[in-house]
Each structure stands twice: as C-alpha cells, then as structure tokens.
Image (spheres, rainbow, N blue to C red):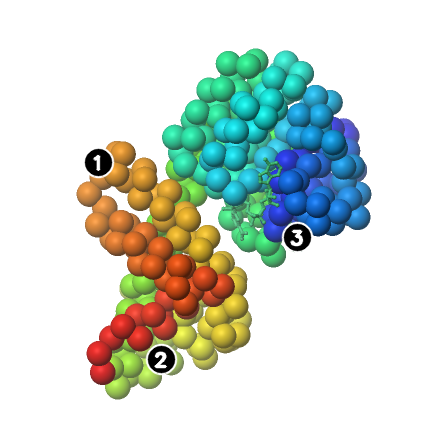
Amino acid sequence: MTTTVAFIGLGHMGGPMAANLVAAGHRVLGHDLVEGCLAKAVASGVEAAGSAAEAAAVADVVITMLPAGRHVLSLYGREGLLAAARPGTLFVDCSTIDVADSRAAHAAAEAAGHRYLDAPVSGGVVGAEAGTLTFMAGGEEAAFARAEPLLSVMGRKAVHCGGAGAGQAAKICNNMILGVSMIAVSEAFVLAESLGLSDQALYDVASAASGQCWALTVNCPVPGPVPASPANRDYRPGFAAPLMAKDLALAANALRSGGIDAQLGLKAAELYEQFAEGAGAEQDFSGIVRAIRAASSK
Ligand code: NAD
C-alpha cells in the first residue's frame, strides 16, 4: 500500500531514509531548512514541500529526523505541524532526543488528536543508506503496528520497547554501555602498552575472555587487530565522537533527573564532551584512546 509521508529533516540520516521510502513506492513530501539537503532529496525522488506544515497537511505519516528535542517540539508546536495535520495522523520521531522531550512531544501529539511513536535508530549513515537501521520504538501497540511497514523499509529490525519515550530510553541506555565500554577498552590498551604487552596480545586474550565486547571486537580502538575498525583509517567515523557526546549528555540528564548513582555513565559523558570539543571533533568515538594516551604520563 502506498503511504503519503511527510519527511522533515533530510540531513545525513533523513536524506537516505526518505530516499529508501521513495524507492519502495511511497509518496514522500520532504522539507529541510538547508537548500542543499532538500535538493539532494529531490534528486532521489522526494517532492519538495513549501514548508513542514504544508507537507504534514496531506500526509498519513509525519516522520521527523532532527538534531535535538527543541527542534521537534518547536516544529510540532510553534511551527504548526500538529495543527496542520489531519486528525489521526501518525507522527514518528526518529531523532535521538531527551526522554522528557519525547514524552512531551507524545503528549502534545495525542492532545492534538494524533498518534505518536518515538523511534530512534542505530546503524549510522551506512545503515540509513542501506536500509539496515535498527529502530527502537516507544508508544502504543497500534501506533507501532501502523509504523512498522515503513520502518521495515528503512531498517532491518524494529523493537517495540514499551510506552511513550521507551525507544529513546533504550537508545541512551545502549549508548551509555557503549561509551563506558569504549573508554574501558581504550584504558586497557594504554595500560597494556605501558606494561609492555602488545595490542595484538591483549586483543587475542580479551576477545576470547571475559573482556569481550563490541567496543573491542568490532570497533577496536587500536589499529591492527580488527582491520575494518576506524582506528585503521586514522579514526575517520564511523560513529563520530560529537554524536556519542550528545547521546551521553542525554543519558546524563536522565541519570540526574532520576537520581541514579551511575558514576561511570556521568564520567563517560564528561570525558566525551571534552574529547568532542577538542581533538575528537571530527573523529570516530574510538579515537578517545589517543586522548587517554596523550594524558598519561610516561
Ligand atoms: P543532520 O544535522 O545531518 O540532519 C538534521 C537535519 O534537520 C538538518 O539537515 C537540518 O537542516 C534539519 N532541520 C533542523 N531543523 C529543522 C526544521 N525546523 N525544519 C526542517 N528541517 C530542519 O543530523 P543527522 O546526522 O541526520 O542526525 C539526525 C538525528 O539522528 C539526530 O538526532 C542524531 O542524534 C540521530 N542519529 C544520527 C546518527 C548518525 O550517524 N548521523 C546515528 C543515529 C542517530
């Protein structure tokens, strides 16, 4: 069945996601504030809408893929998206945003007579282009069921995690594990180097022992043991450090407002903020191993 989709935010992720919906036969009306992003989307078959509200007015489903919660809330409210849409329109927010903002967006959409699903993704630009993203969704079962045919075009897996905000919660919890484990793996390599142990020897042991994790065996922060990891191409992303810093800041907000004693999560947020603002601005998040090495005394 052809669905008319309004797609707002056609950047690194939204652009290829919208293109995949077009390729699957859906009608996609797109909007982005940046002319170049819109032009690229139009070249892939997206129809340019005069404004986000104009696209939402004729859509069955409104997908947003925006930088942060304030963009989503402003579009929904001040910029008139919820008011412009027909009653019962399904709003799917795929951006990674604060759990509290996501719940506020959910409440606003429902109050305006619409359905809402938070559905952040993992898989990066490569996954967006290949249509192999993983979606983690929060909202009512009926909203998830309605979104699923579109999610299955843009991704390979969609997990319904629970009610409003549950998708965002799953995303930040997962990325907090990832941020902390990347720092732990990086610290272990720097310690091993100072003890005269080769990177390969540590890898061979830890990858077959209890230190095994994704940060080690897929995104290994030192060059050599895992040839496809970003460390082998001078830490070109991959998953850029500023995006990890953003996700950890969202986790830190949630930790503080929940009064959770998660000292490593908060420390990881602090370390990634420093790294992303400095040497890591354009590096993969595994480049933090170099910051740890540089800060260590000989
Ligand atoms: P991006 O900055 O490339 O794209 C966001 C787009 O939204 C921009 O083109 C911007 O012009 C547009 N935009 C902002 N406000 C708008 C408005 N009011 N109306 C219309 N367009 C507007 O960012 P991205 O890398 O595509 O990431 C989008 C979201 O996905 C973020 O929340 C990010 O955290 C998340 N995410 C990104 C990745 C990744 O690898 N890039 C991976 C997983 C999740």
Which residue appears farthest toward the bottom when viewing the image?
A: 196
Amino acid type for the residue under numbered disc 3: Glu
Please give left or right for residue 158 compared with residue 262 in the image: right
The C terminus: image quadrant: bottom left
- Residue 126: which quarter of the image? bottom right
What residue is at 35 percent from the left and 80 percent from the top? 199
Residue wearing tag 3: 129
Q: Residue 259 carries which label?
A: 1
Q: Where is residue 271 in the image (x, y as percent from the top left)?
A: 31, 58
**Dot 2: element:** helix
Q: Where is residue 215 in the image (x, y as percent from the top left)?
A: 40, 62
Badge 3 density bin: few <14, some 14–19, many ≥20, Cα 10 Å: many
Please give left or right for residue 214 compared with residue 53 in the image: left
- Relative to the observer, which residue lies in front, 181 or 30? 30
Amino acid type for the residue under numbered disc 2: Asp
Residue wearing tag 2: 199
Badge 1 density bin: few <14, some 14–19, many ≥20, Cα 10 Å: few
Q: Nearer the viewer, mark 1 or mark 3?
A: 1
- Relative to the observer, which residue lies in front, 269 or 164? 269
**Dot 1: element:** loop
Q: Residue 200 carries which label?
A: none
What residue is at 62 percent from the left and 47 percent from the top? 11
CA gap, disc 2 and disc 1: 38 Å
Amino acid type for the residue under numbered disc 1: Gly
Q: Where is residue 53 in the image (x, y as percent from the top left)?
A: 66, 25
Residue 209 visible in the picture: no
CA gap, disc 1 and disc 3: 38 Å
Please give left or right for residue 67 compared with residue 45 in the image: left
